[in-house]
Image (cartoon, rainbow, N blue to C red):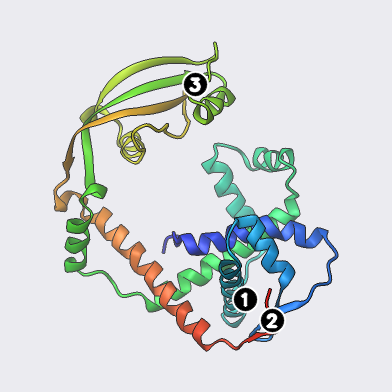
């Protein structure tokens, strides 16, 4: 079972990582606003979520209720994560960023992130992901061929590729220079060289083609490593776009449909759980 790609659940994880340090740092005695299944939510927490995520009071309350409900489900499901699990997850994240584990930890320190606090947040994230996976595997219905064909028909753009792509290839021995370019496209540097190209989809490596087709026109691709240089491609124009035959993309369609079913199963599960939760409003935030 893959990780659940749900914006709502990701927001909870992001909120947790943004806010936890400030909670630990401040000794703050605050009034209780709500009680969810005997667990309090303070007005301080609500205000912190609002500020960190730039959302409304009601949205902050909804996220905090969701978090309390999830925490309770994690306990009831006896989901446990040890230090080995956390280290392995850190290795994966480091590898995705082309770093060793030690280099990744050093990068966190350079950004002023406390390693132990980061590990605790990662531990909580893994617990939630395992909870979502458990819910999805028990509640999710397997996709039928009709489901796949319906999704394919309704989302042709997801299975279409351009035959040619006009790009500007920017390269540099200095990754930071390319990062500055992506943030400010008018940025100039002697360290950056550029060349315009028209790429033929049939001649591009599948992994690169995937990146190109999933990058919008007028945008840069993620920075790639090419021998001793770093490269980013600016997508000028995608031309002669064609939808691939269903049989050629059937596995990709299946993966997308199942991901949608995972999200739907999780959403329905928590809607039911929240409807059954005992929520007491003590005071308005």
Given this view, does label 3 or label 1 mark the residue nearer the observer? 3
Seen from the viewer's position, the closer of residues 84 and 237 is: 237
Instruction: Give the residue pinned by disc 2.
Output: 39
SS for dot 3: loop
**Total count of labels:** 3
- First of labels 2, 1 by sequence position: 2
Q: Pick whichever of labels 3 and 1 is earlier in the sequence.
A: 1
Q: Are the residues tagged 2 and 1 within 8 Å (C-beta)?
A: yes
Q: Which labelled disc corresponds to residue 250?
A: none
Label 1: few (<14), some (14–19) or many (≥20) C-alpha neighbours in 10 Å:
many
- Write down the residue under mark 1: 68
* 171 left or right of 29 in image: left
Quadrant of the rendered structure where residue 39 is?
Answer: bottom right
Q: Quick one: quadrant of the N terminus? A: bottom left
Q: Is residue 194 above or below residue 31?
A: above
Q: CA distance from mark 2 to mark 1?
A: 7 Å
Could you say which is closer to the camera, residue 113 or residue 154?
Answer: 154
Q: Are marks 3 and 2 in contact (CB under 8 Å)?
A: no
Q: Quadrant of the C terminus?
A: bottom right
Q: Which residue is mark 3?
A: 186
Marks 3/1: CA–CA distance: 46 Å
Question: Taking 275 as reference, is 120 left or right?
Answer: right
| Badge 3: residue crowd in 10 Å (few <14, some 14–19, many ≥20) | few
* For marks 3 and 2 on the same chain, the one whose residue lies earlier in the sequence: 2
Residue with the most extreme top position:
190
Mark 3–mark 2 Cα distance, whole angstroms, equals 51 Å
């Amino acid at each position: 079972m893959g990780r659940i790609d749900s914006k709502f659940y990701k927001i909870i994880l992001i909120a947790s990582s943004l806010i936890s340090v400030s909670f630990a740092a401040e000794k703050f005695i605050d009034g209780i606003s709500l009680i969810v299944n005997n667990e309090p939510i303070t007005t301080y927490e609500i205000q912190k979520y609002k500020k960190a995520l730039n959302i409304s009071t009601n949205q902050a309350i909804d996220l905090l209720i969701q978090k309390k409900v999830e925490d309770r489900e994690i306990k009831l499901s006896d989901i446990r994560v040890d230090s080995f699990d956390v280290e392995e997850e850190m290795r994966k994240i480091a590898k995705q960023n082309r770093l060793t584990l030690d280099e990744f930890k050093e990068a966190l320190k350079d950004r002023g992130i406390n390693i132990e606090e980061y590990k605790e947040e990662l531990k909580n994230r893994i617990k939630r992901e395992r909870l979502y996976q458990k819910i999805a595997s028990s509640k999710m219905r397997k996709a039928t061929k009709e489901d796949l064909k319906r999704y394919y028909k309704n989302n042709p753009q997801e299975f279409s590729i351009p035959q040619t792509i006009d790009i500007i290839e920017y390269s540099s021995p200095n990754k930071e220079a390319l990062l500055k370019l992506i943030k400010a496209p008018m940025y100039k540097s002697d360290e950056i060289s550029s060349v315009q190209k028209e790429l033929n989809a049939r001649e591009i490596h599948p992994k690169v083609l995937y990146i190109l087709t999933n990058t919008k026109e007028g945008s840069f691709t993620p920075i790639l490593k090419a021998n001793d240089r770093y490269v980013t491609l600016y997508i000028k124009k995608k031309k002669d776009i064609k939808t691939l035959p269903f049989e050629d993309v059937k596995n990709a369609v299946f993966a997308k449909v199942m991901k949608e079913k995972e999200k739907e199963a999780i959403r329905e599960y928590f809607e039911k759980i929240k409807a059954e939760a005992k929520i007491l409003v003590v005071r308005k935030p």
